Image (cartoon, helix red, strand yellow):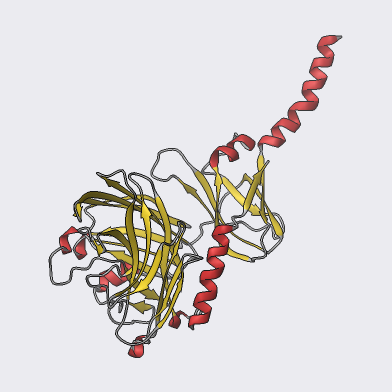
């Protein structure tokens, strides 16, 4: 009799157990007063496995519970063999929530919206882009040549397609062929948001990056590292590893720098934006840690906007003859995170300085009010 009861209970319980393992339900809660559009959200893979242990990474879909449509996703590795996060791109209205179902199915092929690569054919450039904007950093092969530059470069775009490979293939990216161009000048400055030690009231530039590593490469987030050789920063020996992430739909990069220094004291650093000769519109908000620049219009090429948002206290912001600068400090081997990026008025989405400032304020509030993810 007891054996019959056990069989009955197993017959009753097992189907529910199997159902529970056949999918995971994710709720994304937005408690802020901000509408979130095209937000790339990370869901810890370990929590997905805890609810859906039998998931087949090559045969699952993410479904919007309201529209019943597939949601774009990416398996983020962060340079590791094991999956670290499931990334999804979603819209979540203010004071509202969104429910997603992770379940078995054949995923659609979604167009890649981010991309990053080493460019050996162009003197060791490292270039990256998303569906809004593009950037590049300069490598060792360019160092001490006529075209050398210290800071980050901006390639403006007015298409949501990925353009880097086509532009390098044409080798004619200083002319707008309908999708944008490179007309941003960097020179011996921090360009569009690079960071460097600021020791004895002097910017201590490193050489150009020497090594690189791609950690993830789309379709929703591209992340890579740039590694710099040791240099002398005003008597302090410094090495740096810079980890840069660019999400689909974002005008700004997330940049995490780790400085190794032979000093236990905090080291001053500055993040900067090159300044133009003609008058532009400058914003220095030390309290919020936002430094913005709406550049003067450059002939027929249009207007580029650039900005930096700190996640650490801004100790000082100022403008010198060459750059807009914001100062903070770092400690040996402790990561510092900040955001920098750009926009172009000819892309048609951010067309004046007020819209740029509004975008930055909204972005900063999003950082302060992250979406809450619950999985079951």
Residue drawn 26% across the image and 70% down it: 189
Image location of residue 324, percent across then percent down: 35, 73
Residue drawn 38% across the image and 81% down it: 295
* Residue toward you, 172 or 239: 239
Residue drawn 57% across the image and 58% down it: 368
In this picture, is 12 found above or below 69? above
Asked whether the viewer can see residue 95, the reply is yes
The furthest residue to the left: 145
Asked whether the viewer can see residue 219, the reply is no
Q: Quadrant of residue 362?
A: bottom right
Q: Quadrant of residue 303?
A: bottom left
In this picture, is 294 found above or below 330? below
Residue drawn 75% across the image and 31% down it: 15
Image location of residue 138, percent across then percent down: 24, 63
In this picture, is 179 found above or below 326? below
Q: Quadrant of residue 177?
A: bottom left
| Quadrant into which the C terminus falls | top right
Image location of residue 4, percent across then percent down: 83, 13
């Amino acid at each position: 009799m007891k054996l019959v009861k056990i069989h009955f209970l197993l017959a009753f319980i097992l189907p529910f157990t199997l159902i529970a393992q056949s999918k995971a339900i994710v709720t994304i809660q937005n408690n802020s007063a901000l509408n979130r559009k095209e937000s790339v959200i990370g869901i810890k893979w370990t929590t997905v496995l805890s609810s859906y242990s039998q998931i087949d990474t090559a045969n699952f879909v993410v479904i919007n519970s309201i529209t019943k449509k597939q949601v774009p996703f990416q398996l983020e590795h962060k340079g590791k063999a094991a999956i670290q996060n499931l990334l999804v791109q979603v819209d979540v209205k203010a004071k509202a929530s969104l429910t997603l179902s992770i379940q078995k199915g054949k995923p659609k092929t979604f167009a890649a919206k981010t991309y990053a690569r080493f460019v050996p054919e162009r003197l060791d450039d490292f270039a990256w882009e998303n569906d809004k904007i593009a950037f590049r950093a300069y490598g060792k092969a360019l160092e001490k040549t006529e075209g050398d530059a210290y800071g980050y470069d901006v390639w403006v775009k007015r298409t949501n397609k990925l353009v880097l490979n086509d532009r390098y293939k044409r080798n004619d990216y200083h002319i707008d062929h309908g999708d944008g161009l490179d007309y941003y000048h960097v020179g011996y400055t921090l360009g569009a948001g690079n960071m460097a030690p600021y020791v004895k009231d002097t910017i201590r530039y490193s050489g150009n990056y020497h090594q690189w590593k791609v950690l993830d490469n789309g379709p929703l987030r591209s992340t890579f590292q740039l590694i710099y050789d040791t240099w002398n920063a005003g008597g302090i020996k410094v090495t740096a590893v810079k980890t840069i992430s660019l999400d689909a739909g974002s005008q700004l990069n997330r940049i995490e720098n780790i400085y190794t220094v032979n000093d236990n004291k905090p080291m001053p650093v500055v993040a900067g934006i090159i300044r133009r000769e003609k008058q532009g519109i400058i914003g220095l908000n030390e309290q919020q840690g936002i430094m913005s620049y709406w550049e003067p219009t450059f002939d027929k090429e249009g207007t580029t906007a650039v900005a930096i948002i700190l996640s650490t206290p801004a100790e000082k912001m100022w403008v010198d003859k060459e750059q807009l600068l914001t100062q903070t400090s770092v400690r040996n081997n402790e990561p510092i995170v900040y955001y920098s990026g750009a926009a172009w008025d000819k892309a048609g989405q951010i067309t004046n300085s007020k819209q740029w400032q509004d975008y930055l304020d909204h972005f900063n509030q999003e950082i302060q009010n992250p979406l809450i993810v619950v999985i079951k």
